Amino acid sequence: MGNPKILEAKYGFKEYYEKEFLDYFEYYSNFFQKAGLESNAHKTYNEDDLKSLAFIFYQKDELKKNLTTEYTFSARVFKGKGAKYLTNRPSLRNAVLQLLEIDEFPEKDPKNAQWRFVVDCENSKMIVICENLACLKVPYEYKQNNIELWHVGGNNTNPLKAIPSTKLKLPLFYFCDWDHHGLSIFSRVKSIFQEKDKSITLIEPISLSEALPVDSPHHYSKWRKKEFSGLKKDDFSEQQQNKICSLINDNNWVEEESMDLLSSLRKFGFIQ
C-alpha cells in the first residue's frame, strides 16, 4: 500500500474485466501457448501486431501455399504499416518466420498469390466476405454471432469463381472500404455470384460521421471524374447510392475498419 507503482483493483473491477476482456485474454493466451511464442515482458507487441500474429498462426497453411516476398507480406498482413514494417522490427519479423515455420521469405512473388482465408463457424447462419483482414484477425465475437468470415485478398476475386454453388447456401454479405476501389470490387464480386444464381448484400456504414478525406495517409483510391465515379449504379440500393454520392461530393471515404460490422448488421435487421 502506498507504492505508486502498484495498481490496486477496486470494487467491480473483476466483474467488468470478466465481461469485457477475459474472453480475449484467453484467446491470446491459448494462441501464445499453441504457437510456442514467448508471452512475457521480454517481448512487447502492440495491439495490431498481436492481432496479426494470431491471424498468421491460425491461417499459416493458406499463407504458406502462396508465400510472398517479405515486403508484399508486410504490406498485406500489416495493413497501413508499410512494406518495410517487418524489416524494421527484427523481433516481430522473427516471430512471423517462426509462426510460418520458414527460415526466410522468398526473393520473388509467385505469379498467382490467390489467397482465400476462411474463419469457420460451427453453426454458421451467414457468410461475410471482407475486403480487408481486420475482422479475421480476432474473429471471436463473430463466431459468437454465428458469422463465418471469408477474405479473398481485396482485388483478387478469382478464388470466388472456383467455389461451387453447393457451398453457397447461406446468406452472403460483403464488407469493404467505401471508396472507389472497394465499391468497384463489390460490383465484380456481385457479378461473380450472379453467374452462380446467388445474391450478395453490401454492408453499408450506419452513418458517414467516420468518413475521412480521400487524401488521408496510406490511402490511394480516388474518386473518378465521371458520373457516379464510373461505378455501376444498379449494383447499389437507392440509400446506398445517396451515401456514395455524398462521399463523392465531399471527396471523402469510409474505412472498413471504422465500421462496426455487428452494429451495421443489427441496424439493418440482419441479426438480432
Image (spheres, rainbow, N blue to C red):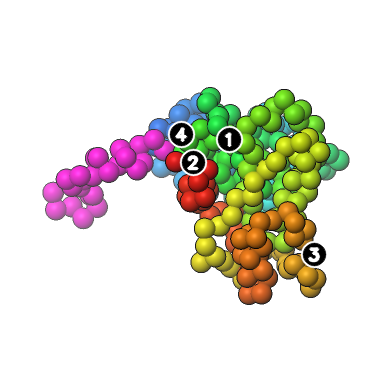
Q: Which residue is mark 3?
A: 230
Spatial CA span between label 4 and label 3 = 38 Å
Query: In this rendering, which labeled residue sits more in front, label 1 or label 4?
Result: 1
> On the image, numbered disc 4 is attached to which residue?
144
Distance, label 3 to label 1, CA atoms, is 30 Å
Q: Nearer the viewer, residue 156 or 245?
A: 245
- Label 1 close to label 2 by CB (< 8 Å): yes
62 with respect to 144 (left or right): right
**Image-quadrant location for residue 181:** bottom right
State the residue position of label 1.
126
Identify which amino acid the numbered label 1 is placed on: Met
Q: Which residue is mark 2?
A: 271
Type of amino acid at the residue the image marks with label 4: Gln
Mark earlier in primary sequence (1, 4): 1
Q: Position of residue 260 (x, y in %)?
A: 50, 51
* Crowdedness near tag 3: few (<14), some (14–19) or many (≥20) residues, C-alpha within 10 Å: few
The residue located at (39%, 35%) in the rendering is 23
